[in-house]
Image (spheres, helix red, strand yellow):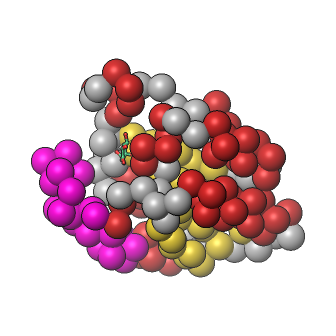
Amino acid sequence: KTALVLNGPNLNLLGIREPQVYGSQTLADVERLCADACAAHGLKLDFRQSNHEGVLVDWIQEAGRGQKDGSVAGVVLNAGAYTHTSVALHDAIKGAGVTLIELHISNVHAREAFRHHSYISPAARAVMAGFGVQGYSLAIAGLAGF
Ligand code: DQA
């Protein structure tokens, strides 16, 4: 089965963007880390990034279809700032009926108040935040264990 790891806006800038918050590893480094975690848990990896909300909606719907036909294990989603704004992503996760782990590199609850609310959390199976990029490996291990 495939683990879909979906990354939202500005995560293409990982490594350059606010390294004191997000660390110095790039998105390519994160993809390698996810590939290792998937290999360790007998999963295939499908790793994607988009800055566009509607593209993320399409990918979540695609993951839901994949989960129904048995090809997809679930989704690890770092929705970036859309976490705090997107009813559309909330509805997509519920509508697709997909098993989804919400992920944040930083501990959003220790940051600005506008990051404390998530539209993703009520639709997610689990939430991972504050482990840095190693959270991606931990989330894949968690997904494999569901
Ligand atoms: C983030 C946290 C969000 O608040 C922020 O908008 C991001 C990244 C994280 O991984 O810590 O873009 O999701």
| Range drawn in magenta | 13-33
Q: Is residue 117 left or right of residue 134?
A: right
Q: Give the residue displayed 64% in from the left and 31% down from the top.
A: 122
Q: Is residue 126 left or right of residue 68?
A: left
Q: Give the residue displayed 69% in from the left and 62% down from the top.
A: 58
Q: Give the residue displayed 57% in from the left and 48% down from the top.
A: 101
Q: Give the residue displayed 46% in from the left and 61% down from the top.
A: 51
Pick the residue in front: 14 or 105: 14
Can residue 64 be seen in the rendering of this structure? yes
Q: Is residue 85 left or right of residue 30?
A: right
Q: Tell me the quadrant of the picture where the N terminus can be found.
A: bottom right
Residue 64, relative to residue 32: is it above or below?
A: above
Name the quarter showing ligand 1. Answer: top left
Residue 108 picture location, percent across and down? 35, 33
Can residue 74 be seen in the rendering of this structure? no
Residue 88, relative to residue 109: is it above or below?
A: below
Q: Residue furthest right?
A: 69
Corner quadrant of residue 61: bottom right
Corner quadrant of residue 91: top right
Q: Is residue 134 left or right of residue 9?
A: left
Residue 136 picture location, percent across and down? 42, 58
Residue 129 picture location, percent across and down? 39, 40
